[in-house]
Structures are given as C-alpha cells and as structure tokens.
Amino acid sequence: MKALQDTLLPRWPALWWALIGLSALALCFGVWCFSQQLTYGDIVTGHRNPGYGGAAWGMYIVGYVFFVGVSFAGITVSALSRLLHVEALKPATRIAELMTISALIAGSCAVFADLGRPLDGLLKLPRFARPQSPFYGTFTLVVAGYLFSSMVFFFLSARHDAAYMAEHGSPRLRWIYRLWATGYRGTLAEQDRHRKSSFWLSVSILPLLVLAHSTLGFIFGIQSGRPGWFGALQAPAFVVLAGVSGTGMVILALASARKIFALESEIPLATLRWLTHLMATLALVYLYLMAVEELTASYAAPTADRGVAHAIVAGPFAPLFWITVVCLALTFSVPFILRLRKLTSLPWMVTVSVLANVAALLKRFLIVVPSQTHGALLPMEHHSYSPTIIEYGILLGLLGLLCLAVLLFGRFFPLVHSNPNLPDSTASGADSRTASVLRYGSSIAVALLAFAMVLLGLADSFRLFSDGELDPRIPYSPVLFAGGVMLLFCAAIVYETFPRASRRRSNAAEPVEAQDQSRVEPEDQAKT
C-alpha cells in the first residue's frame, strides 16, 4: 500500500483545483440566492399556498429528502462493513461516512431555507416542539442524533490514521491531527477497544437511521387530509429509495476518488460492484412498492386519491413519472445483465448510479408537489408549481458544499482506511485494573446520564408534567432530549479515550524479552 501522504496528492492538480473552484462558485451562488430570499421574502420562490396558486413545499423539501437519503447509504455501508465483516466494503467506509456528515448538514440547510422566518423557527423549535408533530423527530433524531452519531463514528474510526498523520502529515495541520488522535498509541488493546465500540455503535446507529428515515415518511404518510400522501407505504418507501439514491452517490464518490487521487489499488472494482448490486436490488424493491401504490390508488382509493394518481401516471406529471420508472428499471437491469455475463464495467456502474439519483430526485418531486397542486379535498381549481432560479441556486449551493467537503478533506486526510505502522502498534498496552474500572465506570455513567436526559426531555416534551398547559415545565425540554441522544453516543468516546494511556505505560506493557533484548543489543554491538 502506498504511503498515506502520497494518497493525498491529486493525480491531476489542475483538475482538482478546477473542481474546487466550481464547487466554491456553486456555494457562493447559493449563498447569494439565499440572501435574495431573506431580503425580498418567499415571493422570489415558486412557493404558494396549496389550493390558492401552487405548493407551499417545493424544491427545498425535495432537496432535504434527497440529501438525507444520501446520508442513509453512507452510514449504512460503514455499519454493515463492521457488523457483517464485508471486506469488499471496507475501502468505501471513510468516504461513505464523510458523505453522511456532509449530506446531513446540507439537508439541514435545505430545511432552514424552506422556513419563511428561519431565525424565528430556530429559536422557537427548541422551546416548544412537541413529539405529536413528525418534525420533532426530524430535528431531534435526524439533525441531532443521526448527525452526531455519524460524527462520533467518523471521529473514532479515523484516529488510527490521524496518529500517523500527526507524525508525517503537513506541519501546518499537525495540531489538528494531534488533537484528533489525542492519547492514541496504536496498541493492540486500543485496537481491540475500537472494534468493540464500532460494533456497538453500528448496532445502535442502524435502528436510529431506519427510524429517522421512517420519520420523514411519516411526515407525509400520516396526513390524512392530504390525498396522495396518506398511506402505510410512505415510511418503508422512503427508507428503500434513500438506499437507492445514497448508494448511487457513494458509487459516484468512490469512482471520482479513484481517478482524482489515484486510488485504483485502494478502492478495487469489487467494492463498486458490491455496491452496484445492492443498489440494483433496492431499485427492484422500490419498483414493486411503486406498482403497489399506484394500483391501490387507482382501484380502491377515494376519489381525491385517484385524481392525484391519475395526474401522476397519465396527467401533467406523467413525463416525470415514466422517466423515473425507466431510470429505476435500467438501474436494476443493467447490473443484472452484467452479472449474468460475468462482466465488470466501471462506466456502466457510474451510468446506472447517475440514473438512480435522477430517478430519486424526480420521484421525490412527485411525492411532494402533486398532492399540493392536485390533491385538495375542497372544490378548488388545480394549480401548478414552477421552481425559480432562487430555489435551484440554493440547492446547487448545497451540492457544491457537499463536493467541496469531500475534495478538501481528501487533500489533507486519507480517504481510505489504512494500517500505518505506529511506534506502539505491536505492544499489548493492557490497562491496569484501576484504568479498566475507570474506563467502564465512566462510560456506563455517561450512558446512564444520557438515558435520564432522554426520558426526562421526552416526557416533558409530551407535556406530562404541564398539567394541561401548552408550554413545557422544563425549559428547552426538546433540547434536553436531543442532548441526551447525543450524550449517549459520547459514551463510546469515553470508552476509547479515557483514561488516557501514557507512553510509559505502553512501553511497560511490552514483553519482558523484548525489553531485555533492547538493553542487551547495544552492549553486544560495543563488544563487536
């Protein structure tokens, strides 16, 4: 395996700088578009009230669901690699984790742009949010718990490489590497603790991300007064489509990293092939869910639901619907044919990944918009929704933010997990009895405190202590709940990093024969 510092150099520096420039330009354009929206109001967007001119939710919510879907596949790939020991997925874990964090931040910004008064919403949500609204789970589980758990996962999994970069990386950034790898020596005991914490983090993150994406589906599925949204398939369909689009984005990121940073040997085609097969399987499952949804709406749904279904399949939204179906069909059929012929083609894998994300974007548009423009229960005229340059610009800026994060991180830190040789990598570094008691006791204490905060914050968010009052008794009880979820994952950091192992302890843990040999060798050399 090539040296870590060699993997940080782009193969074509000019191309890397060009991509950095385009991503930064897209981000700046998005910031300018958002400033125009803040200055002139939502009138610069295509949003209007449902039934009176258009749709209140548009491209911002489409972008939010898309970015959160990208994050789903990212952390899923990393968790499955550790739980099931899938060797083919290990080269993809760090890029997948990085995309998860970046996509969640971009999705949060999309919701921020959708708020008519963003500052007012950010101030009132932590004070008055109630679990009866699906948005409570969106901000406490998706934005707080899901994002923070992914950051903890990413932080702990990269400490090994951070310790190496602290000695061999850029001198200007060594303080960051040292801070990241604080106390890490690479001993066998530390590696064993990391395997244990990674396993339990994976076990806890997978149910959390399924719950988080199901919450997105519930935002639409439990609204009984909105034809086209109300249904039991929304939650599982959101999870499956998130897997399709997210896996496709991971494939595109891996293929780009192979070319830009010359990582062909570190990211083999077997990794991309495994992910492509996963994406194809999920695409077939989603096609089945689409068929069930449309057949149910056409044959047995109320009149308003049938109207929305007909508008999507054979009405003004039909071109988008059939393009989605074709893209999903190709996403499944092309890898299936390659599998039958025992072929591996990187261009085809990249192509179907692009088609999968095109299908995901169009389908999310078909979920969000038609039910607002054509799904009124009252006798109102049908209207239309046309996104403006402001909406496209903000989403383009968020995509630029995502690309910029991956490109910059890959320039200063390895994008693929490696096993660099550290000074104490062969030392057992076993903890003393006192250190073990402190380690387990402190991590359990943090976990118990987190559970107490979760239960107390959730109970008061339900107004169980308010005696019928609308406001919670405990100030900022939703924040207390979200803070408890975040603190729960901090127990893994405490378990791995506390108490800090000293250099003397690591050396003292080496075998006695090795220490004796190190003392004898200089004398023998002197005699020679």
Image: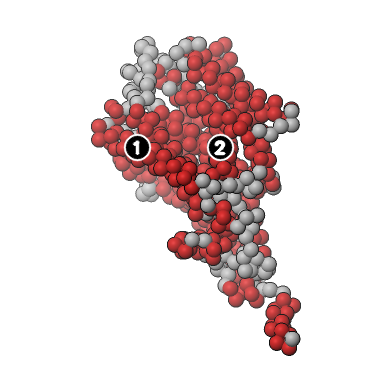
**Left or right: 469, with 283 as reference point:** left
Quadrant of residue 389 within the rendered picture: top left
- The residue at the point 58 percent across, 57 percent down is 4
**Amino acid type indicated by mark 1:** Phe
The quarter in which the N terminus is drawn is: bottom right
Q: Give whichever of 478, 255 is nearer the camera.
A: 255
Q: Which residue is mark 2?
A: 252
The answer, for residue 390, to whether it is visible in the render is yes
How many residues crowd around disc 2 within 10 Å: few (fewer than 14), some, or many (20 or more)? Answer: some
Colour logic = secondary structure
Label 1 or label 2, whichever comes before in sequence order = 1
Quadrant of residue 283 within the rendered picture: top right
Which numbered tag is attached to residue 326?
none
Q: Indicate the position of residue 315 as horizontal and vertical percent values.
A: 47, 11
- The residue at the point 60 percent across, 63 percent down is 440
**Amino acid type indicated by mark 2:** Leu
Q: Indicate the position of residue 307 as horizontal and vertical percent values.
A: 47, 12
- The residue at the point 68 percent across, 73 percent down is 510
Q: Give whichever of 523, 336 is nearer the camera.
A: 523
Which numbered tag is attached to residue 29?
1
SS at mark 1? helix
Q: Indicate the position of residue 37 as horizontal and vertical percent values.
A: 29, 33
